[in-house]
Image (cartoon, rainbow, N blue to C red):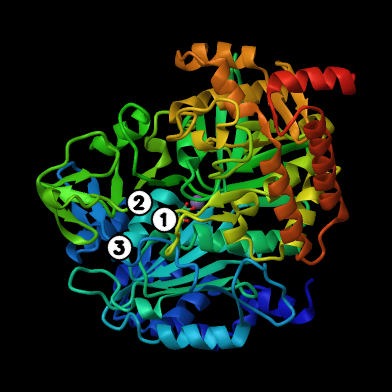
Amino acid sequence: MTNDKQKQDKSLPSSSKIDMFRLETMKTYLVGLMDESNCDKLMRLSPAVIKPIFNGATRLNPSSIFINTGSDEDMAYIRLQALKKGEEVALSTKNHTCHFDGPDDQGRDTANTRYLAYDETPISSLQHKLEHRAGLLEVRTIMNDLMKDKEMIVSFISRGPVGSPVSDPTLQVTDSYYVTHSEFLLYRMMSPEAFSNDVEQKGYIFINYHSAGALTPTKVSANLHNRRIYMDVEGWRSYSMNNQYAGNSIAPKKINHRFANMNNLRNYFGSRLDEHMFVTGFDLDGEVVYFAGAYPSGCGKTGTAMTGSILIGDDLAKIFIDVTSGEVRAVNPEKGMFGIIEGVNRIDDPETMEVLTSEKHEVILSNLLIGNGQPYWEGMGEKFPQKGYNFKGEWHRKYGEPVSHKNARFTISLDSLANHYQGKEKVKGVKLSGLLFGGRDYATMPTIVMAHDWTNTVVHGAIIRSATTATEIGADGTEKRSPFANEAFFPGPLGDYIKHYLAFGRNPAIAAKNLPSGFQVNYWLHKSARQALFPGDTDGLIGEKRDTKVWMNIMALMHQGRVETIWTPIGRIPKYKDLQKMFSRVIGKEYKRETYSQQFSLYIDNLVRRIDMSILEFSKEKGMPEEFFYTLDTWRRDLLALKSTIGPVVTPAQMIEYVAANLPE
Ligand code: SPV
Ligand code: MN
């Protein structure tokens, strides 16, 4: 997949390639835009880091440059500027602020998110590609002089624990104090020296240019018609212009996650995965079992992560193989949380609420209601004030408008949370026992299915479908395919992704006993889709948010083989008696057999429809491995055999009888 042209462009401009005269020219230019203390910081950087700063500055043309080392002093300046410039407002709780994005800048802009790639570089059928030069020219024209009356802030980030071989050295150039402040909470910042060394060692940098562009009097991006999120996957440079919403502007999050995925495909095929997954651990009788779970945006990933007793991360996971132990391990490229705030309340989310209400913790809120200096959001379980202002402007209770946007967020550092891993940072990551895949799937998949083997794990991950959510601009709630809940962030062809995933689980460096189990999970089953057995109430979801803790615990036991499971064509499901006990023990809730049947019966027609849809969609992808279709064909055949014996809806009890009669184990 790599050719000489790519190799050449991707390689780092090492010190020797930047001649001394050019370097002096760059420094002279940059120094002209800095005060003395920033010059000192600049001089601590290697030429390979100075060059992209110079390139950005000559195009963006800022009035000054601030080099942010993440020190207390630098961050005090950033926080102060965010308030002074009106990018954030102080709330009545100390250390808490609120930022507003414009009413039309409340989610990821998928239409204007494009990959700049050479003709011969294939890009996912679910993503937008632009010819490399043409894309660069377009976005560079837009970025010209965009910082004319502003300061350019430069930060040095490690996407992952400092010192880990899988962490990405990441340079952020922006004119937004809010973006820099958020990144301080969300990422590990590095000193100029440490960053330069890391770049030298790893041989690449993710380079990110962001500008909010001209701002309106209310300090939101004025020129959304020129909003662009362009990612040069040949040179690991991103250009995010005329926007503020974090999913577009905070490049180390999804923009660089995409780069990491492309980097894996090219350089770490079958040995590293960068996934849209939480990582969280459960204490089972003294042993901590860690799971990573992928859910599309806005489907409860953060809430699920929070049910763990030892939280590592809620959004992204870098998964790799530790060759010494033969284990599959994961680190979090982030160290903070950018979570959806709607529905966060004291009963369901006590740990999060503790952080969101205490001055001991630094918090940035976005796109909700402020009344008398207090924040309000939908589903917080408190009475709203008569009036206030939110992301749309003035708000009055009498008009009945929602107080917050569905994608309103909170930004915190993970170490604020009581259940976060508080020990010394684990450069080696944590051992993963399970990979979970789920979507906002109202009718098809049972609540938990454990995949038969690695191939089945990959197939379960690939066929997720989910209703679209407010995390993307223009989403209308219709269902769409969401392979591995990562399709929005995987630049390469899906066929390559599937092969890469299959190869990962078969990597001989993984000891067989250490291969994680795969699970399809679905917390979104709707009562209306389960009327065949128990007609009646059709309103709402079958389960509750608090049930998640039980699901996570039972999966840990299923993985360890400590509970019996029931075979089905698509995977194994848990038994009622174990769940009943666990519901009572873990959350003190009575779990009815009827609910179990609703959640775990196979609705065969729906499943076959999902299989057929998946076969059709993936058959259009190039280079798909035959075993992918073979697996789905096997599911289909076995489901139809089951239907002809039992009927279109098969309860777990019927499944047990069927297995006893047909498949002696
Ligand atoms: C998501 O939407 O998946 C998020 C927030 O985690 S962001 O990607 O930053 O929009
Ligand atoms: Mn996400």
- Where residue 271 sits: x, y (%)? 76, 50
Residue 406 is marked as: 2
The residue beneath circle 1 is: 470
N-term-proximal mark, 1 vs 2? 2
Q: Are marks 3 and 2 in contact (CB under 8 Å)?
A: no
Marks 3/2: CA–CA distance: 13 Å
For label 2, the crowd category at 10 Å Cα-Cα, with few meaning under 14, some 14 to 19 and many 20 or more, is: many
- Mark 3 falls on what kind of element? loop
- Amino acid type at circle 1 is Ala
- Asked whether mark 3 lies closer than 8 Å to ligand 1, one says no
Rendered location of residue 564, percent (x, y)? 73, 16
Which element is circle 2 on?
Answer: loop
Residue ID for mark 3: 101
In the drawing, does residue 339 fall left or right of residue 284? left
Amino acid residing under circle 2: Lys
Nearer to me, 636 or 44: 636
Earlier in the chain: of badge 3 and badge 2, it is 3
- Whether residue 617 sits left or right of residue 420 in the image: it is right
**Distance of label 3 from label 1 (alpha carbons):** 14 Å
Alpha carbon separation for disc pair 1 and 2: 6 Å
Query: Which corner quadrant of the image does residue 135 belong to?
Result: bottom right
Q: Please tell me which residue is depicted at 70% across the width and 16% down the height of the picture.
A: 563
- Figure quadrant of residue 6: bottom right
